[in-house]
Each structure stands twice: as C-alpha cells, then as structure tokens.
Amino acid sequence: MERLPGGQRFVLIADDDPAFLSELTNILADRGYLVLGAKDGRAAQDLLDKHGPEIALAIIDVFMPLVSGMDLIRALTTSKAGPKIIAVSAAREKVLDAAISLGADAGVRKPPANTPLEAKQWLDAVFLQIGLD
C-alpha cells in the first residue's frame, strides 16, 4: 500500500449529498487528511483552480449540479501529475465505467446508507481497491 503521492495530503470531495460529504470529511480528517469539500460542481471547480497541484486524491460524484462530475474528471486528468480519482455514484455501473474511461482510477457505487460505520467500511474498501492505506 502507498500513501498519497509526494506527501500531499489534500483530498477533494465533491458531492451534492450533504450527509455523504460530511461523513467522508469527518473520516478523512480523523485520519489526518486535509479535506476540501464541495457541495456542487462549480464549488469543486473553484477548489481545483485554487489548490489543483496540492490535491492528491479526488472523490467525485458523477452527477452534480452546475458542473458535472464527468467534467471535473476531465479537468483533473489533463495533468500528468494529477491526483488519484475515485468516481462515485448511486447510478448503474455503466456510468462509473464511463468515468473510468475518462481517466478515473476507480468507479465505485455509493454505500446504500450513510452511517459512520458504513461510510468508514466503504472508504476502507475503496482505498484498498486503489492501493492506498
């Protein structure tokens, strides 16, 4: 397992589900990550513009208002030194496959409930899938 590249610890979470965003933010902050949270695509784009090179991991909801998750994934993959990208959605696998084809490192369905334990177990499984601890 590896840590986030280059000692960078910024994680961008872009999701319009406030409960999911809050749970992931709390879990990652407890693990020592600096979390940049965005409740819609435009806010996420603003954070990318401001902190782009500092972001080592991005967890992006595929369907968001104002700027789509797919557009954010495209923006994130333009740099060779870009972050690891996890595309998330409650939608079918086909949507996540499309996100991977755009350059996401993984496409993962959101957990069905947002209890702290379920969110932690989901995040642990996602990190294992992409080789992070």
Image: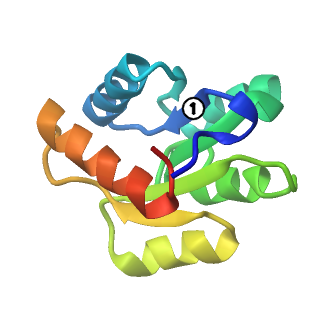
Farthest residue, direction front: 1
- Judge whether 121 appears above or below 105 on screen: above
Which sits in the foreground, 67 or 12?
12
Q: For mark 1, give the secondary structure.
A: strand
Give the quarter of the image for residue 104. Answer: bottom right
Give the quarter of the image for residue 16. Answer: top left
| Residue in the picture at 33% in, 67% down | 91
- Judge whether 98 appears above or below 76 on screen: below
Provide residue 14's location: percent of width, then percent of height: 51, 38
For this view, does 109 lie left or right of residue 60? left
| Residue in the picture at 57% in, 69% down | 99
Provide residue 130's location: percent of width, then percent of height: 50, 60
- Judge whether 13 appears above or below 78 on screen: above
Asked whether the viewer can see residue 45, the reply is no
Provide residue 12's location: percent of width, then percent of height: 58, 33
Residue matched to label 1: 11
Q: At label 1, which amino acid type do we have?
A: Val
Which sits in the foreground, 4 or 69?
4
Quarter placement of the C terminus: top left
| Residue in the picture at 24% in, 38% down | 120
For this view, does 51 lie left or right of residue 2? right
The total of numbered circles placed on residues is: 1
Asked whether the viewer can see residue 67, the reply is yes
Provide residue 8's location: percent of width, then percent of height: 69, 29
Q: Tell me the crowding category of disc 1: few under 14, some 14 to 19, or many 20 or more residues within 10 angstroms, Cα based.
A: many
Q: In this figure, which colouring scheme has been used for the structure? A: rainbow
Which sits in the foreground, 89 or 83?
83
